[in-house]
Image: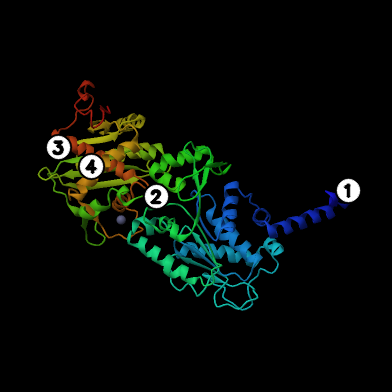
């Protein structure tokens, strides 16, 4: 204030210059001011706590909700700030894989090369005249001579990580792939932590910041919560009512503080929608740090036991389910309800002798209503299923309307299957199918299409493998087809269309309520 008083109104530009100078000086000392000046971001209170915690403790383990700016704050802002204050530090940024590491380092390098505001705050933070400047390593101008680059960014399982480090910055090193998809990698990640990464510490003054989501009960993140790893632990989780962020310190939930949500980015409405779409298990993992366990993936064993390895580039029809096995179809209208979901039609043939299920037709797509009706009619003409089960909800009647509009549509034996809360019913219904698969009562073709294939069979396998994480469009239709087949086992018959409603109150109390579509 006293500074401002000495300046006359006509000295406006001078005052502006002084204010600017003040901001630059503050940005040099305070990370909050640094973020605001260089990046133009307002540091959220929960993010501020990450930086404070990481500065306070030499071993800081931070659990923070997914997509809340972890990488921006801790792998981009923080390294620049650390190096700006002390160019002699040697940083390793460790994430789940090399691609992510390269992206992070690319962003850091670009800012050092050309960001004017960063240059203003830390004028001597610039590339070294002689030193590496690659996609994995960069070296800035410093006073010491060291073998290691100033910043190196790598995937957690990389080798060749150099000799020495002063700071290890772990940024979600555990991911879906190395925690769940390939369980054997869990141990390798833990071994890499001890052998590769801790091996870079020589002096005892080194620091580790580890920021993450929870994944699995036996992964690295869970391992280092144990007292012998000497971490201080900060937890931030979205509250049960989605209204704030709960924060507590330590391995066990202790005294809880409440912090505001990320206003404008993650309002309660969006959090709730997210949790509905992804299911509570995955939401609780990603936003509340409740780790998953192997037993939570119901199809792992079944997929192994029921897989039929096909010739390369085979198609589903090459599985050749015998013609005389009765067919049943399930229809999920997910794509009509939710924007990003697909609708799916799953048809299986069942061996009346040993009850083995053979998929004969799987199709899914972002179809319009009439397109869905046409697809269904096509399935009916090809496979003549005994029963077609459609999830019984408001859309079932819409489907009926579409079917009525196409020629022959009214002849289909469609029944509504009342599922109640869809997710809940899947959770109850799917373990039964998982068990069938474990007993080899399914034929699940492996068409050897490679990991990126998005054909319906590969999508189905992927959903089985990942469930309950990820989409379940095809699982829902598979489940409905199986329900139809189960009823068919007892009483295979063709449904008549347009009859009275009264017959529908059958003995299906346990299985759900039936209603005819037409
Ligand atoms: Zn495929």
Q: Mark 3 vs ligand 1: CB under 8 Å?
A: no
Task: Confirm or deny contact between disc 4 and disc 1 (CB under 8 A).
Answer: no
From mark 2 to mark 3, how far is it between C-alphas? 39 Å
- Res. 489 mark: 3
| Sequence-first disc among 2 and 4 | 2
Kindly state the secondary structure of the residue where label 1 is placed: helix
| Residue 26, position as x, y percentages in the image | 72, 56
Q: Where is mark 1, residue-wise?
A: 9
From mark 4 to mark 1, how far is it between C-alphas? 79 Å
| Sequence-first disc among 4 and 1 | 1
- Res. 432 mark: 4
Q: Where is mark 2, residue-wise?
A: 291
Marks 3, 4: nearer the viewer? 4
| Sequence-first disc among 2 and 3 | 2
In the image, residue 482 above or below residue 188: above
- Label 1: how many residues lie within 10 Å, few (<14), some (14-19) or many (20+)? few
Marks 2, 4: nearer the viewer? 2
Kindly state the secondary structure of the residue where label 2 is placed: loop
- Label 3: how many residues lie within 10 Å, few (<14), some (14-19) or many (20+)? some
Give the quarter of the image for residue 506.
top left
Observer-nearest of 260 and 517: 260
């Amino acid at each position: 204030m006293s500074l401002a008083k000495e300046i006359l109104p006509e000295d406006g530009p001078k005052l502006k210059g002084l204010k600017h100078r003040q901001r630059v000086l503050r940005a040099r000392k305070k990370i909050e001011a640094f973020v605001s000046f260089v990046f133009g971001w307002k540091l959220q209170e929960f993010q501020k706590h990450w930086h404070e915690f990481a500065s306070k403790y030499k071993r800081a383990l931070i659990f923070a909700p997914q997509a809340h700016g972890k990488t921006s704050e801790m792998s981009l802002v923080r390294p620049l700030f650390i190096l700006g204050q002390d160019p002699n530090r040697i940083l390793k940024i460790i994430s789940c894989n090399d691609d992510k590491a390269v992206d992070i380092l690319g962003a850091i390098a670009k800012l050092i090369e050309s960001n004017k505001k960063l240059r203003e705050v830390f004028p001597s933070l610039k590339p070294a005249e002689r030193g590496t400047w690659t996609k994995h390593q960069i070296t800035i101008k410093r006073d010491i001579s060291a073998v290691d680059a100033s910043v190196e960014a790598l995937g957690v399982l990389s080798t060749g990580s150099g000799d020495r480090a002063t700071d290890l910055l772990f940024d979600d090193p555990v991911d879906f792939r190395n925690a769940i998809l390939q369980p054997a990698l869990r141990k390798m990640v833990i071994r890499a932590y001890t052998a590769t990464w801790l091996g870079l510490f020589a002096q005892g003054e080194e620091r580790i910041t580890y920021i993450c989501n929870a994944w699995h009960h036996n992964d690295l993140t869970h391992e280092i919560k144990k007292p012998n790893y000497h971490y201080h632990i900060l937890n931030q989780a979205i509250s049960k009512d989605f209204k704030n962020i709960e924060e507590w310190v330590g391995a066990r939930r202790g005294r809880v503080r409440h912090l505001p949500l990320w206003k404008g980015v993650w309002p309660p409405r969006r959090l709730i929608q997210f949790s509905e779409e992804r299911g509570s298990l995955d939401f609780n993992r990603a936003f509340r740090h409740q780790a998953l366990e192997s037993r939570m993936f119901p199809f792992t064993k079944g997929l192994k036991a029921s897989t039929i390895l096909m010739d390369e580039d085979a198609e589903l029809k090459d599985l050749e389910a015998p013609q005389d096995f009765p067919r049943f179809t399930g229809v999920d209208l997910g794509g009509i309800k939710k924007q990003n979901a697909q609708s799916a039609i799953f048809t299986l043939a069942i061996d009346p002798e040993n009850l083995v299920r053979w998929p004969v037709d799987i199709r899914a797509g972002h179809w319009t209503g009439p397109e869905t009706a046409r697809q269904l009619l096509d399935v009916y003409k090809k496979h003549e299923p005994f029963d077609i089960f459609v999830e019984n909800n408001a859309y079932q009647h819409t489907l009926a309307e579409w079917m009525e509009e196409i020629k022959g549509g009214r002849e289909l034996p469609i029944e509504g299957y009342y599922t109640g809360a869809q997710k809940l019913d899947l959770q109850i219904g799917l373990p039964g199918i998982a068990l069938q698969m474990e007993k080899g009562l399914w034929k699940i073709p492996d068409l050897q299409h490679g990991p990126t294939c998005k054909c319906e069979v590969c999508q189905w396998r992927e959903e089985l493998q990942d469930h309950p994480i990820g989409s379940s469009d095809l699982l829902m239709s598979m489940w409905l087809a199986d329900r139809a087949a189960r009823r068919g086992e007892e009483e295979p018959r063709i449904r008549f269309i347009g009859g009275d409603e009264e017959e529908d109150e059958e003995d299906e109390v346990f299985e759900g309520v039936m209603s005819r579509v037409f």
